Amino acid sequence: MKTHPVIDIDGHVEMALVPDWKRHFPAPHGEALEKAILRHFSYERMKTSIRREGAWDPKARLADMDDEGIDIAVLFGTSVGLGYDPYPPAICQGYNSWLAHYCSANPDRLKGVALLPLANIEAALEELHRAVSKLGFVGFLMKPSVGALTSDAECFHPLYAEAEKLNVPVMVHIAHGARALLAKRYRLEFIREQTIGNPISLMMALMDVIYGGVLDLFPRTRFAFLEGDVGWLP
């Protein structure tokens, strides 16, 4: 390991391309999740768009990391995790268990980010504690907005307090609800929506965290704002 390791802070995995992924979910949650995924993507389309086997095979990912000089990869989901809707507890538990299995190929180099049921804060707190304390995850995915709620909503404060207690960052990632407006304007033009949608989402998320007083209430909680480059920051 280098003195200053190279860290990929925004890696992605694709659980749905693992043949036996549903074994991590009790019935009927695995079947329900598969139907939800296939409403947006076919397995064939996922295999076409996600060409690196490391997305579902940790050994292939580690080989790619060696080739690219990456020491550590911090991992988010793709078809599971990037949707706008909050997931129920059973889905989050199953996904996190699968991701822990993926990371077990080399837990020093592969680090999971927990998916939490953000519409159920008590369950989210329980799953965050399990993910960090038992699975070895390094943070949790916080959406810039959850339905009509922005990230400074008071109901999320217990999560930030728990993150502070566990000493893990809040990983603010994917789009703000406002991005849905861009999707309507640039329908079927993903590259246009992605180019402007991610930076705007991060601007709005950072604005909410600052103006909502979250950093004053939880001064030791660390936030990461991901997948929007850095041009949005000033």
Image (cartoon, helix red, strand yellow):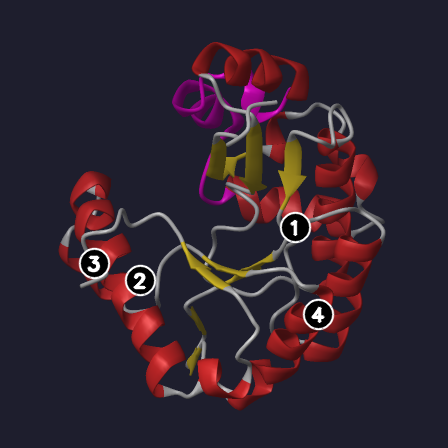
Label 2, label 4: how many angstroms apart (C-alpha)?
A: 23 Å
Asked if residue 75 is positioned above or below residue 225 in the image, the reply reads above
- Residue identified by numbered label 2: 202
Span shown in magenta:
39-57
Query: Relative to the observer, which residue lies in front, 218 or 146?
Result: 218
Q: What residue type is labelled 3?
A: Trp
Q: Is residue 160 above or below residue 109?
A: below
The label nearer to you, 4 versus 3, is: 3
Query: Which SS class for mark 2?
Result: helix
Disc 4 crowd, CA 10 A, few/some/many (<14, 14-19, 20+): many
Tell me whether the residue at label 2 lies in contact with that at label 1, contact meaning CB atoms closer than 8 angstroms.
Answer: no
| Disc on res. 232 | 3
Please, is residue 116 above or below residue 211 in the view?
above
Residue appearing at x 72%, y 65% in the figure: 166
Identify the mark nearer the N-term, 2 or 1.
1
Is mark 3 in CB contact (under 8 Å) with mark 2? yes
- Give the Cα distance between marks 3 and 1: 25 Å
Which badge, 2 or 4, is on the more N-terminal residue?
A: 4
Q: Does the image show residue 183? A: no
User: Residue 197: where, in percent of width, then height?
Assistant: 23, 55
**Mark 3 or mark 1, which has the lower sequence index?**
1
- Image quarter where the N terminus lies is top right
